[in-house]
Amino acid sequence: MERKTPLQWKELFSSKEFEEKYFYDKDDLGAVYKKDSTIFKVWAPTAKGVNINFYLTGSDKEDKAKCLGSFSMEKEDKGIFKYIAKGDMKNIYYTFSVDVEGDIKETADIYAKASGVNGQRSMIVDLLETNPKGWENDKRPIIQNKDKVIYEIHIKDFSSDENSGITPEYQGKYLAFTEKNSTLNNDGKNPTCLKYLKQLGITYVHLLPCFDYGSVDESISSKEQFNWGYDPINYNVPEGSYSTNPFDGNVRIKEFKQMVQSLHEEGIGVIMDVVYNHTYSLNSWFQYTVPYYYYRIDENGRLANGSMCGNDTASERKMFQNYIINSVCYWVNEYHIDGFRFDLMGLHDIDTMNKIREALDKLPNGKDILMYGEPWTAGFSPMENNAVPAVKANVNLLDENIAIFCDNTRDSIKGSVFKSKIAGYVNRNENIKQSKNMKQLTNEIKHSVKAWCDKGANFYPKSPKQIISYVSSHDNYTLWDKLVYTTKNEDFKNPEIFIKRDENIVQINKMVSGIIFTCQGIPFIQAGEEAARTKQGLDNSYNTSSTINQLDWKRAYEFKDLFDYYKKIIQIRKDFSPFGNLDLNTANSITFLPLQKKYLIAFIIEGGNKDDKWSKILVYYNPKNSKQKIELPQGEWNLILGNSEDWEKGYLQEKSVTIFGI
Ligand code: CA
């Protein structure tokens, strides 16, 4: 029999007739468990037949592995296949065998809520039994705009360092987040992990992928393996390698919830990094269930590669759009998630992003759930049906409560993420030729202060709510390494160059935090940015090792002064709501003062309310290694923070002030 080509599939799926005949919008796909029976439904409109297979274990390599039988599913309307299993099916593993054009693929359930080791078989789960003690009282914390500070962390990196003070069997796991009194090498003095975060004052942890991904073999716990996890296998199942037992499908669910519960108890929200834009490979449950439906195909019949991972998904297809919306809502309802970071959001279409927002808004306190993403792609991806990509240039088409990572702010502060030697405002070295001069960089910083709401570039955020202000994330160099590259001229192959302390760089790093936390928009830092985190000059460490990637807790205390500075500036931001109220009027009302030296920046921000510590704040940035005497505007001023200890004196009587450079 002749099989359809990808282009023929594309033609079929793009037709109005197909959508009208097969679009299914009920939320009962997958396994719906009840004590006396479980109902299974698969959407497989192109299948001739579907069988369901039951197993005792998640893989054949385990003790007691046994197939319990295979049964034919019944075809219903809308391309649905259905099977009802009588009796209590809890903890039984299952797959589907889907026959499309005579090609039979055994696949896990794309709607699976639980799975066995490596996500190869789905599992029937009684979710109530996975709830930790007190889960019914767990609530998403209410975090005011002015208090929003995001901290990006990889679950393993957080605690895999042997100095972390975390119980050895929880190091690198979900449960590390449940230990609230860990200290450096158990010294009882210097907090690590959760207690450290609490002291720093961040209010959200943003977790790198923690849905089930494929690049780490969960069955081998003895071998050192590391990956960031941007390779999805099961979107609605937690990753198994972060659990203490990846074989029993219940354990990862329960431990994930324990992590969320513990963070919530400390008033910290949990944001998931979600990667709906591609799958680990084309050998995916999507492809096995409905070949080529979930993927974008170009006009030559090739899979789109805007993700640079070889298989872009197609958010503009109705059933996949629905899938993403349901998946995001599921994480909120079942795991009490507080926000989502969309990987390569530019590969999704605007309509899908806005519909996700709409669905979240309808949930209890749903408007508080954060949504933001990377407003770019890694390459071209052909969308169908005139769908509009959610890229930076289209930010004004996104709901005001969907934010974008602002690469303009990121690069103007410390330079390009791609060219190691190219610097920005804080580290500009006149000896290195680069396209932007200091005047341009200074102007860009001024736009950054207003979260680019002043029409300073060719993208138009509706308000500071749409801007994530940041300088570093897991991608590219750590801030510390970037500052090493841009301020030194040495043999960068020598790791010591990055590891050793450098007072000049510490000062620049403080300056960077000073800018990020006085900008409008939502501040975001990479874990360890406040602790001179280094990857020894490596810009892409996604599959290297824990040694390179993990937080180095000893180092954090060697740079305690940097941590203290971040802590102070975060507190100042919280004590003065106009910095973070995310209001367009506040951004518009910021006034820059004219100064003689063009590279200096000074601005007044007013509007402190009765709960704020101050009514207005005057901010100076001096990026050069020189002191500058500046006249103060009329009025009485207090010194609250600067690069010199002199700045801690308090009430100021002089009419002028000296601002210290880096
Ligand atoms: Ca996995």
Image (cartoon, grey):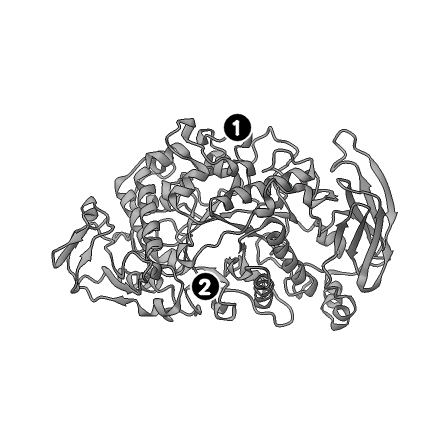
Secondary structure type for disc 2: helix
Quarter of the N terminus within the rendering: bottom right
- Under mark 1, the amino acid is Pro
Between 445 and 116, the one nearer to me in the picture:
116
Q: In this view of the protein, can residue 173 be seen by the observer?
A: no
Q: Does 167 appear above or below 606?
A: above
Q: In this view of the protein, can residue 320 be seen by the observer?
A: yes
Q: Residue at x 62, y 53 (%)?
A: 333
Expressed as whole percent of the image width and height from the top left, the position of residue 234 reads: 66, 48
What numbered label is drawn on residue 466?
2
Classed neighbour count for the residue bearing mark 1: other residues with Cα under 10 Å, few (<14), some (14–19), many (≥20)? some
- Under mark 2, the amino acid is Gln
State the separation of the CA atoms marked 1 and 2.
Answer: 40 Å
102 left or right of 641?
right
Expressed as whole percent of the image width and height from the top left, the position of residue 214 reads: 63, 43
Expressed as whole percent of the image width and height from the top left, the position of residue 39 reads: 80, 51
**How many numbered tags mark residues here?**
2
Between 502 and 531, the one nearer to me in the picture:
531
- The answer to which of marks 1 and 2 sits earlier in the sequence is 1
Identify residue for label 1: 168
